[in-house]
Image: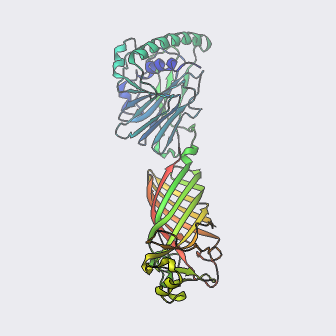
């Protein structure tokens, strides 16, 4: 393996000599003057806008702001095959260059107005350039490099050091070229490549094929062809792009049908619509394309149903009722039998039902750029602990004044909810309905919770 300094002068010597008129049309003939032999140059145009550039591994990238988007890859076929290795991929509007060997040089032309974010690994190298020098293939005049700024997240390399490294690399290149002459004399190198993408509709079918002969002749053939592609990592997404975490918080109430949860119920089953439903999901996209995903995960849900009746109890049959009214015929009688609460009023009390679940979300999603629509089925198993159940709280003293009542025998041990969400980037809204009653039993009313709220969803990387 050669040092990355071996490739950098080679890249500049070959690519920066392109005639500027080559940008006008893909079918325009282009002359490439080079003194390097057995060097392969591969080009791919990019028709879609690129908003994010990720440079990973030990990749060496020269970024040039241009009026069109395309990539030139320069490398020695004897040493590496970056195209076959899948070093260049595009997902959505994200261009990723991940060269594990660091032997190739990637000249990336992008529109500055579209590019919003550049991510760079510690070992990767990015050179920012805004100039072309088509007439000088040897680059003996170092003054042109005053227009180049190098950026590395680990260090900021001094320009003079870069010049010295380039000088040494040119000597190495000269020696390696002499060795390759004796092995592959007269061989013509030619190839094309397709960047791996989810949907090829966004790419031109005109693939530019560059031929560099051994003698570096000025009659380099530069033409377009239409033919089948060699797709690199098509339809491929890394695990960190498939894995996501969602945090949801919403308003909760219930109704007597799955579709009317916001209409409330009468009597002792009447609830306050409160922001007291919380969920967290971790999902993995088992199937993922540019516009579709099928995901599976695990989640946790906590719901608090707050009654409008201050003091609610549960009968042995599982029916909720006003305990002060039915058991004591008034709050004064309640105080007489519970002197510890002397000096309080009935309005000082509140009652709530706490339920918690472990869920297995199964979702399908559709997306276009940053806009997402997802539908998720949420089969879940109820969790019953000392923190769940029916609680009566004395608000004036901010304590659970009565023992928590375990009503797990009246709750359905499992449920199945359906959630619909609309999201832009990481923020969205959701609505969730229940397809099964909350309580289990023939004598209890059928009650269906309903949730409406906000969500935050991020990829885990």
Q: Is residue 221 visible?
A: yes
Q: Residue at x 56, y 38 (%)?
A: 229
- Number of numbered discs visible in the structure rendering: 0
Horizontal arrangement in the rendering, residue 153 relative to residue 438 (left or right) = left
Taking depth in this image into account, of 426 and 270 the one nearest to the observer is 270
Q: From the viewer's perspective, is residue 440 above or below residue 168?
A: below
Q: From the viewer's perspective, is residue 393 above or below residue 212?
A: below
Q: Residue at x 41, y 41 (%)?
A: 51
Residue 99 image offset from top left, x and y in percent: 55, 30
Taking depth in this image into account, of 293 and 209 the one nearest to the observer is 293
State which quadrant residue 390 falls in: bottom right
Q: Is residue 322 visible?
A: no
Q: How is the image coloured?
A: rainbow
Taking depth in this image into account, of 230 and 2 the one nearest to the observer is 2
Residue 441 image offset from top left, x and y in percent: 64, 81
Q: Residue at x 53, y 45 (%)?
A: 198
């Amino acid at each position: 393996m050669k040092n990355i300094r071996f490739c950098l002068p080679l890249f500049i010597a070959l690519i920066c000599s392109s005639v500027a008129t080559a940008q006008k049309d893909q079918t325009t003939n282009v002359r490439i003057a080079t003194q390097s032999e057995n060097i392969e140059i591969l080009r791919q145009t990019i028709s879609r806008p690129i908003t994010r550039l990720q440079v990973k591994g030990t990749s060496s990238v020269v970024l040039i702001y241009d009026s069109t988007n395309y990539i030139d890859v320069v490398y020695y076929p004897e040493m590496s095959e970056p195209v076959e290795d899948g070093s260049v991929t595009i997902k959505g509007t994200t261009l990723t260059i991940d060269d594990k060997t660091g032997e190739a040089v990637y000249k990336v032309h992008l529109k500055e107005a579209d590019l919003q974010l550049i991510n760079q690994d510690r070992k990767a190298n990015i050179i920012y350039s805004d100039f072309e020098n088509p007439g000088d293939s040897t680059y003996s005049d170092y003054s042109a490099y005053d227009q180049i700024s190098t950026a590395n997240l680990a260090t900021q390399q001094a320009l003079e050091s870069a010049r010295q490294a380039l000088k040494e690399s040119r000597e190495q290149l000269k020696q390696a070229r002499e060795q390759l002459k004796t092995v592959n004399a007269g061989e013509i190198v030619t190839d094309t490549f397709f960047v791996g993408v989810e949907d090829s509709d966004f790419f031109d079918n005109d693939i530019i094929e560059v031929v560099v002969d051994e003698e570096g002749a000025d009659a380099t053939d530069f033409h377009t062809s239409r033919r089948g592609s060699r797709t690199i990592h098509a339809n491929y997404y890394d695990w960190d792009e498939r894995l996501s975490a969602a945090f949801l918080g919403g308003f909760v109430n219930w109704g007597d049908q799955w579709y009317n949860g916001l209409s409330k119920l009468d009597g002792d089953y009447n609830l306050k619509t409160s922001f007291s439903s919380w969920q967290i999901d971790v999902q993995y996209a088992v199937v993922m394309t540019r516009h579709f995903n099928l995901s599976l995960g695990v989640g946790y849900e906590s719901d608090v149903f707050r009654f409008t009746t201050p003091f609610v109890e549960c009968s042995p049959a599982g029916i909720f009722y006003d305990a002060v009214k039915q058991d004591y015929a008034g709050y004064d009688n309640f105080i007489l039998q519970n002197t510890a609460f002397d000096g309080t009023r009935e309005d000082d009390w509140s009652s709530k039902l706490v339920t918690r679940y472990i869920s297995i979300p199964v979702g399908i999603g559709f997306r276009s750029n940053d806009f997402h629509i997802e539908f998720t089925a949420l089969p879940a198993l109820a969790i019953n602990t000392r923190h769940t159940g029916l609680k009566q709280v004395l608000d004036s003293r901010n304590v659970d004044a009565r023992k928590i009542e375990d009503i797990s025998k009246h709750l359905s041990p499992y449920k199945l909810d359906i959630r619909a969400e609309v999201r832009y980037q990481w923020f969205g809204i959701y609505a969730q309905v229940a397809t099964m009653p909350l309580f289990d039993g023939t004598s209890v009313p059928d009650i269906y919770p309903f949730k409406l709220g906000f969500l935050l969803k991020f990829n885990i990387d």
